[in-house]
Amino acid sequence: MREEMILEVKKLTKRYGKLKALDQVSFEVRAGESIALWGTNGAGKTTLLRSVLGIIPYEGEIEVMGFRVASQGKEVRRRIGYIPQEIRFHGDQTVWETISFYSRLRNVPFSEAEELLSDWGLDGIQHQRVQTLSGGMKQKLGLVIALLSNPPILLMDEPTSNLDVNARYEFHLLLEELKHSGKTFIFCSHRASEVLKFADRIVVLKSGVKLLDGKPKEVKDYLKGETLRRLLDEGVSVLDFEVESKLR
C-alpha cells in the first residue's frame, strides 16, 4: 500500500530582489515522516518553512494534504502546527489566558485546551504569568499551542536553540512522544545530534539550492563535515561532539 503523500514542494523559488533565497527546491514528504532541513545560516531553511505556511509569496508549487498553499492558505494552516525559533507571548498574561486566547482564535473548545495543558504537564502552572516561565516551559507552552487543533503536521524552526541542556532533553522527550503518535515533522536544527535523533530524511540546503535529500546514513559524511566545521568556526557547545560517535 502506497504511503500517503502529505506535502509536495515543486520548484520552490523565493526572490528578495536579485537574491534567490530558494532556487528550484523540490521534495516530497509522506505521512508520519520526519524531515530535517540542514544548512548554515542563509541556506533558506526558515524561508522554506514560511513558504509552506503560506505567509510569504513564492514561485513554484506547494501542496499540503491536497490543498494548494498559494490559493488555499487558510485550509493549509489548519493542518499545520508551527513552533518558531523565538516564541513571543504577552508576558503579563497567565498561561491559561494565553491558551484561552489561542483556543478562541482556532475555535478549539476550552475543555480540549485544558486536557492538553494536563497532558503536557502545564496544568499546575496555568495561573502563572508567562514572563516568569523558564525558556523550557515557554517552549513547552508553544508546543501546546501548536497542538491545539491536533494538526497532523508540525513545522519547527530551531525549536531547542535557546534551551539549556536539561530543557532540551525534556523537549526531546515530548517530540519523541509526538513522533511515535504519527505526527509528521519538518524541522530545522543546527544540532547534528538532534537531526540524527529525529530525522527519517535530511534535506541539505546551501545558498537556497537543494544539495542532497536522503536518509541520515546517506548524508552522514556531509553532515559530519559540516558539524565539525561549525564547532570550530562558531564555537558551538562541546556537547555536540557526542554526535561523532554516531557518525562514524
Image (tube, grey):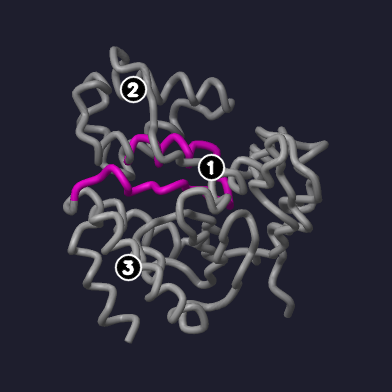
Residue 226 in the image, given as x and y percentages of width and height: 40, 68
| Number of the label disc, if any, that sits on residue 204 | none
Q: CA distance from mark 3 to mark 1?
A: 23 Å
Q: Position of residue 90 (x, y in %)?
A: 36, 17
Amino acid bearing label 2: Trp
Q: Please name the amino acid that badge 1 sits on.
A: Gly
Q: Which residue is mark 3?
A: 193
Q: Are marks 3 and 1 in contact (CB under 8 Å)?
A: no
> Residue 153 colored magenta?
yes
User: Mark 1 sits on what residue?
Assistant: 81
Q: Is residue 178 above or below residue 75?
A: below
Q: Earlier in the sequence, mark 3 or mark 1?
A: 1
Q: Residue at x 59, y 55 (%)?
A: 207
Circle 2 SS class: helix
**As rendered, which of 245 and 118 lies closer to the eye?**
245
Q: Is residue 22 left or right of residue 49?
A: right
Q: Residue at coordinates 51% horizontally, 72% vertically from top-left?
A: 200
The span picked out in magenta is: 140-164
